[in-house]
Image (spheres, rainbow, N blue to C red):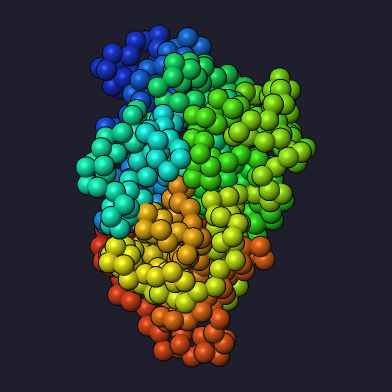
């Protein structure tokens, strides 16, 4: 078998290449083996990545034990939580493209034979999966796992995002400053990705359903010994994938993409998957439309309720059976012939998984929480190209809402108005010019929803935006509205006081203004001046596609 790495390690003419490796302590024997890249997003910035240095050592041990040579390199990884509330949040989604590009460049420049991807959090995991699909090499993902839940708050073990709701309670006098500061110290007792089913843990679970991670490993808590064992086994497994020539695009197929959408919908995953699934599909040359996403979610039962949809957190989900238990319940609607990194199909992997005994977290397929899944795409004159919401996190009483528009042209303006008590019951808060181009970078509207919740307005208001949401949000919210306001979408035509109708049952979102009036308003509309006039965000804003296409930067037909 010929290895790619021979381009750097074999032959008399490669003495220079070998000398460079040997200067770092690699032996002549190690340079005769397959070279396996380890793309490690470890840092002391992101709690979900703090464990990755330890896991990298376990991965290396597994690679060596199976006859390979590990070669580790660093990858950026930004923390959504630390970036919230300032300009940093605009960089988060665009880092996904940087991660995919950087991994591609490192792997191709050094001709690695396979790649182990070490990442846990929101845009890092999808960026890594995009790189794997683009490179089409043997690849496996190892995530760091969720943190353990923190103190009891609002009837459940909370996570760091509960602090925003705490701020809302503080604003209306329902929590003292001392109570809020005590909460700060107790919401996240361990490292790991935030313990709720936000984008980080959703993407880990999705990667397992996609077949790119060892079965049963996505939701293992970061601080459990089984997490290191899974890393070691993944190091062993990448060598088998290299020897068998199983590459990423043999795994990331149309069937696998559909399985991932079903899993995310069945567990009520983050709305951000509506951005990441099309981006991964694009890299894998798999045809995808937002209509397909809507069709699949509408036909997928909701089988698990996890924070923010319920009191259980992701470690609870793991103890209840995790991803494999949910896949087992959905076996009849999955593409069971989809290949996975085990070298076996989904069907073969599930053959040893027992049907669950129904528990407070996961229900059987015979008794779902609802017949349709946790995510939904809405359509109408406000979103002719679609908008995304998360019924699993919305009180059914709020699935229909009609209210008067309260319009803001930025997230910061919105948050300030909420804290100044300028948003009232019955309002539909409109946050525009926060899409991929207009933001730029499509920032999260996480804080606004949490503030509304803390101030007792979560069930009395709605929020719609061309930006996106955190997986931890609840209340009545609709994001990813396409076309975005910066491109002249209907969102740009809304005025304070206009009536807006949201009907999740009918998958509709409409501005209750005549089409003639909307057209007249848009004819007078002028796009705002770009917020960012230089640097990477300027490049991203000029190249990024619509949210309905995953907000990708295209690079192939």
Q: Residue at 38% across / 65% down in the picture?
A: 434
The foreground one among 334 and 392 is 392
Q: Quadrant of the C terminus?
A: bottom right
Q: Is residue 61 visible?
A: yes
Question: Tag count in the figure?
Answer: 0
The foreground one among 107 and 127 is 127
Q: Is residue 15 visible?
A: no
The foreground one among 280 and 404 is 404
Q: Residue at 27% across / 67% down in the picture?
A: 420
Q: Residue at 55% across / 25% down in the picture?
A: 319
Q: Residue at 69% across / 22% down in the picture?
A: 353
Q: Residue most toward the front?
A: 174
Which of the 4 image quarters holds residue 408? bottom left
Q: Quadrant of the N terminus?
A: top right
- Residue 355 in picture, x, y percent from top left: 72, 26
Q: Residue most toward the left?
A: 178
- Residue 402 in picture, x, y percent from top left: 54, 73
* Relative vertical location of residue 482 with respect to residue 469 in this rendering, above or below: below
- Residue 155 in picture, x, y percent from top left: 46, 40
- Residue 286 in picture, x, y percent from top left: 63, 49
């Amino acid at each position: 078998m010929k290895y790619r790495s021979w381009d750097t390690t074999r032959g008399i003419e490669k003495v220079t290449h070998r000398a460079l490796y040997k200067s770092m302590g690699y032996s002549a024997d190690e340079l005769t083996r397959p070279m396996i890249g380890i793309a490690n997003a470890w840092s002391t910035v992101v709690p979900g990545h703090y464990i990755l240095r330890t896991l990298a050592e376990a991965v290396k041990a597994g690679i060596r034990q199976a006859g390979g040579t590990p070669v580790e390199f660093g990858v950026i990884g930004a923390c959504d939580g630390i970036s919230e509330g300032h300009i940093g949040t605009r960089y988060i989604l665009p880092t996904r493209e940087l991660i995919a590009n950087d991994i591609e460049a490192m792997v191709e420049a050094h001709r690695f034979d396979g790649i182990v991807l070490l990442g846990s959090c929101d845009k890092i995991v999808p960026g890594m999966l995009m790189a794997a699909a683009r490179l089409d090499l043997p690849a496996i993902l190892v995530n760091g796992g969720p943190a353990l839940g923190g103190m009891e708050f609002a009837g459940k073990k909370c996570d760091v995002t509960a602090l925003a709701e705490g701020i809302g309670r503080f604003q209306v006098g329902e929590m003292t400053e001392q109570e809020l500061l005590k909460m700060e110290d107790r919401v996240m007792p361990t490292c790991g990705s935030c313990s709720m089913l936000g984008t980080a843990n959703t993407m880990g679970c999705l990667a397992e359903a996609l077949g790119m991670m060892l079965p049963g490993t996505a939701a293992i808590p970061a601080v459990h010994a089984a997490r290191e064992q899974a890393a070691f086994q993944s190091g062993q497994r990448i060598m088998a994938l290299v020897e068998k020539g199983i590459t990423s695009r043999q795994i990331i197929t149309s069937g696998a993409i559909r399985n991932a959408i079903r899993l995310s919908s069945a567990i009520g995953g983050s709305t951000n998957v509506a951005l990441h699934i099309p981006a991964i599909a694009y890299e894998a040359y798999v045809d995808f439309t937002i209509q397909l996403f809507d069709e699949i979610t509408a036909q997928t039962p909701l089988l698990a309720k996890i924070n923010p949809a319920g009191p259980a957190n992701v470690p609870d989900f793991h103890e209840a059976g995790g991803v494999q238990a949910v896949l087992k319940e959905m076996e009849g609607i999955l593409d069971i012939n989809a290949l996975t990194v085990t070298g076996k199909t989904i069907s073969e992997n599930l053959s040893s998984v027992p049907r669950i005994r129904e528990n407070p977290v996961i229900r059987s397929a015979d008794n779902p929480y609802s017949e349709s899944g946790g995510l939904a795409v809405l359509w109408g004159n406000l979103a002719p190209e679609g908008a995304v919401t998360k019924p699993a996190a919305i009180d059914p009483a709020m699935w229909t809402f009609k209210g008067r528009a309260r319009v803001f042209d930025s997230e910061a303006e919105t948050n300030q108005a909420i804290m100044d008590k300028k948003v009232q019951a019955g309002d539909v808060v409109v946050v525009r010019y926060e899409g991929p181009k207009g933001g730029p970078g499509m920032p999260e509207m996480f804080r606004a929803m949490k503030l509304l919740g803390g101030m007792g307005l979560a069930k009395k208001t709605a929020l719609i935006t061309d930006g996106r949401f955190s997986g931890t949000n609840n209340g009545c919210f609709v994001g990813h509205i396409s076309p975005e306001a910066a491109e002249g979408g209907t969102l740009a035509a809304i005025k304070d006081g206009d009536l807006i109708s949201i009907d999740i049952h009918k998958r509709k979102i409409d501005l209750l203004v005549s089409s003639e009036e909307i057209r007249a308003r848009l004819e007078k509309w002028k796009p705002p001046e770009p917020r960012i006039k230089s640097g990477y965000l300027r490049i991203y804003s000029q190249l990024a596609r619509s949210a309905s296409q995953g907000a990708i930067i295209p690079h192939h037909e």
